[in-house]
Image (tube, rainbow, N blue to C red):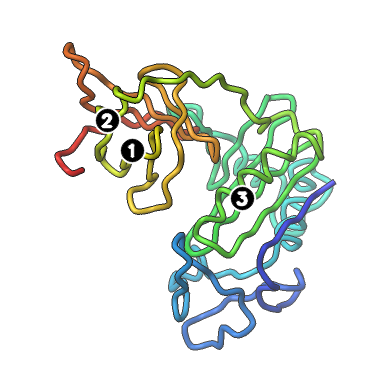
Amino acid sequence: MYGCVSTTGTRAGGRGWASRSLITARESTSRCAGGEGTKGTSPEKFVEPNLAAGGLWTTPTDLAKFLIEIRREYEGTSHKVLDRPMVRAMLTPDDHMVQARRWGLGIEVGGHSGDPYIRHEGSAYFQDDMVAYLHGSGIVVMTSGGGGGTLAEEILRSAPSVYDFPDFRPQERTAVELAAATLPKYVGTYGYVKVALGQGFLTAEIPAGSSPQRLYAESPTHFFVLDGPQELSFHMDGQGQVTGVDFITPMGRHPLQRSSEK
């Protein structure tokens, strides 16, 4: 079973997969969904000049059909796009690369060896995500906003309950309360992450300039947000002053130094 979710209108028309097309700068974009940035602003026209990398406009249903075809080719029951050896090579992760997420040829490969999934996300003025289990269900989410990734993540986390995904279940955490007097020492800019003080709690802009998210403390040095898998682990010196932070995501752990900018 495949679930398709879209917060946009239909994106173009074409052949084969019924609603796909390559859009260039010279074409009218009246057939395409418009996008909004994280602050609600819209570009006059959004065109991806590199058609091979991002010029294919399509719909969630089309992508679901594509994922189903990839799964069939992986199993050897179809060869409409690629042959089985090519698909198998594409979906074989490079185990020589040390990273939290494993990648084949352009597609993330996750899950357990007995029930692997493939995944690919996309973002520009649009935020999209698609996941398909090679032996089960899948889901495609498309949004038309710069902040749509948060919505896509929420929908993906609900998939285990609806489609019985073995992965992507919400992680339960226990928050602790820190003394209000200790919060100002965390405030500052750490690379592309900005931490600020709210009404008795800390917030983080990830990245700086985006909408702030509330930070919840798991310990005096470890914080998390509710809208995604991002975590912050603060570094402290011998005097208890914050000197930097590790920005933690499923992609890995990224150390960021504290700057003088507030």
Q: At which x and y percent is residue 134?
A: 75, 38
Up-down relation of residue 56 to residue 122 (above or below) = below
User: Relative to 64, is 187 above or below?
Assistant: above
Picture quadrant where residue 111 is located = top right
Camera-near label (2 vs 3) is 2
| Residue under label 2 | 184
Q: Residue at x 34, y 53 (%)?
A: 209
Pointer 2 or 1: first along the chain: 2
Q: Position of residue 97 (x, y in %)?
A: 43, 30
Q: Is residue 143 left or right of residue 41?
A: right
Q: CA distance from mark 2 to mark 1?
A: 7 Å
Quick check: marks 2 and 1 in contact, CB under 8 Å?
yes
Q: Which residue is mark 1?
A: 197
Q: Amino acid at mark 1?
A: Leu
User: Is residue 191 rendered to the left or right of residue 230?
Assistant: left
Foreground disc of the pair 1, 3:
1
Q: Secondary structure at mark 2?
A: helix
Residue 44 locus on image (x, y percent):
45, 81
Which residue is identified by label 3? 151
Secondary structure, mark 1, is: strand
Q: Amino acid at mark 2?
A: Pro
How dense is the environment of label 2, judged by Cα within 10 Å: few (below 14), some, or many (20 and up)? Answer: few
Residue lying at 68% horizontally and 30% vertically, measured from the top left? 169
